[in-house]
Image (cartoon, rainbow, N blue to C red):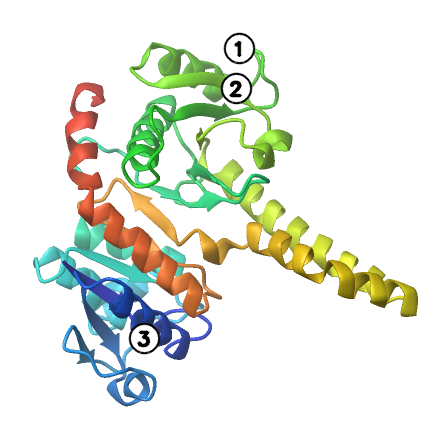
């Protein structure tokens, strides 16, 4: 399979992007990678391989660019060329750690939506205490949503959890302010009934305070709420580890204690590390489009490639197309 990669997207591009690709090409003999970006910069870090080629461009979409305008005007940007390769059939899927809004715009305008899908959804895996993680969508692609959209998110999330994450009959939860059926606003109440009647393993409402305990395998919500939950978890985790570090550096006694529990603390930190879970899939597009975290290191890129490869291998897009037809909305 061929994967198109935006080598210039992200805080540490192209170095960390290329180092991640080097590792992925060694690990997976069935992938070929097309790297889009500045050839001289890329070649500094690229290990020779017959399964990697570079398409040179010196145009890049920056994190400060207005997404839609940038995609329309910067026709030779690495992200735009990457998406165009997927549309033209030159690649099976694409991956970028660049501007999230621009990637969503490129996905919509260039790769295109699956027929019947009204709104694509951003679907990362949220770390949990047991290390398994939760597929959660939408986490930022759509600020507003209708019950029909959340139903489609649930269908796509269920297929992804089953085919890529290997979870049989994934449990679907609806993010709400309480677990009772009658709780919530108009959106969640109507969505609850639709999920209840759908051919899904719907377990009911889940509260945000329970997310890290993995109450479900897939949790659906609107993008406004989901994005705030994601950033709250990221911020809380980062602050918590900073506070723990500060406590352990207080005096000699705590420094000795820190040395004794360092391996356990490292394991805990890895459990909550986004880079271990890959990127966020833009579900609902005609091909796998993966958004890696903007601060991705080589390990995060490697795992994002693994995730992309598994989506292609298991034909997740084809299965979504088949599953969504009976639920098309008018």
Name the residue rendered at 61%, 23% in the picture: 177
Find the distance from the CA under tag 3 to the CA under tag 2. Answer: 42 Å
Q: Secondary structure at mark 3?
A: loop
Name the residue rendered at 32%, 51% in the picture: 307
Residue 205, labelled with which disc? 2
Name the quarter where the C terminus is drawn: top left
Which residue, as the protein is rendered here, is positioned at the far front? Answer: 260
Name the quarter where the N terminus is drawn: bottom left
Nearer the camera: disc 3 or disc 2: 2
Left or right of residue 323: residue 61: right
Q: Secondary structure at mark 1?
A: loop
Query: Which of the two discs, 3 and 2, labels the residue nearer the N terminus?
Result: 3
Crowd rating for badge 2 (residues with CA inside 10 Å; few <14, some 14–19, many 20+): many
Mark 1 sits on what residue? 181
Find the distance from the CA under tag 1 to the CA under tag 3. Answer: 48 Å
- When asked about the image quadrant of residue 159, the answer is top left
Find the distance from the CA under tag 2 to the CA under tag 1. Answer: 7 Å
Crowd rating for badge 1 (residues with CA inside 10 Å; few <14, some 14–19, many 20+): few
- Residue 242 visible at all: yes
- Residue 97 visible at all: no
Decide: marks 1, 3 in contact (CB < 8 A)? no
Nearer the camera: disc 1 or disc 3: 1
Name the residue rendered at 50%, 54% in the picture: 274
Mark 3 sits on what residue? 60
Decide: marks 2, 1 in contact (CB < 8 A)? yes
């Amino acid at each position: 399979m061929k994967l198109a990669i935006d080598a210039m997207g992200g805080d540490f591009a192209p170095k960390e992007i290329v180092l991640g690709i080097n590792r992925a090409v060694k690990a997976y003999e069935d992938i070929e990678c097309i790297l889009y970006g500045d050839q001289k910069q890329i070649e500094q870090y690229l290990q020779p391989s017959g399964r990697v080629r570079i398409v040179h461009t010196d145009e890049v979409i920056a994190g400060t660019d207005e997404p839609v305008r940038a995609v329309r005007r910067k026709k030779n940007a690495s992200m735009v060329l990457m998406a165009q390769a997927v549309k033209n059939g030159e690649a099976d899927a694409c991956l970028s750690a660049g501007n999230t809004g621009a990637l969503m715009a490129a996905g919509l305008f260039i790769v295109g939506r699956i027929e019947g899908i009204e709104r694509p959804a951003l679907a990362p895996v949220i770390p949990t205490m047991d290390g398994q993680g939760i597929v959660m969508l939408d986490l930022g692609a759509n600020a507003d949503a209708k019950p029909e959209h959340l139903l489609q998110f649930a269908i796509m999330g269920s297929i992804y959890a089953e085919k890529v994450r290997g979870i049989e009959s994934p449990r679907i939860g609806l993010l709400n302010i309480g677990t009772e059926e009658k709780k919530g606003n108009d959106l969640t109440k109507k969505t609850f009934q639709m999920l209840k009647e759908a051919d899904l393993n719907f377990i009911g409402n889940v509260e945000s305070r329970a997310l890290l305990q993995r109450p479900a395998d897939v949790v659906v919500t609107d993008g406004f709420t989901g994005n705030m939950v994601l950033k709250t978890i990221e911020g809380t985790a980062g602050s918590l580890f900073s506070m723990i570090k500060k406590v352990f550096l207080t005096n000699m006694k705590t420094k000795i204690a820190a040395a004794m529990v360092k391996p356990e603390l490292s394991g805990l930190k890895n459990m909550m590390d986004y880079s271990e879970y890959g990127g966020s899939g833009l579900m609902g597009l005609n091909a796998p489009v993966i958004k890696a975290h903007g601060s991705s290191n080589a390990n995060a890129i490697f795992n994002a490639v693994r995730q992309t490869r598994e989506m292609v291998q298991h034909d997740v897009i084809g299965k979504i197309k088949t599953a969504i037809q009976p639920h098309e909305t008018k």
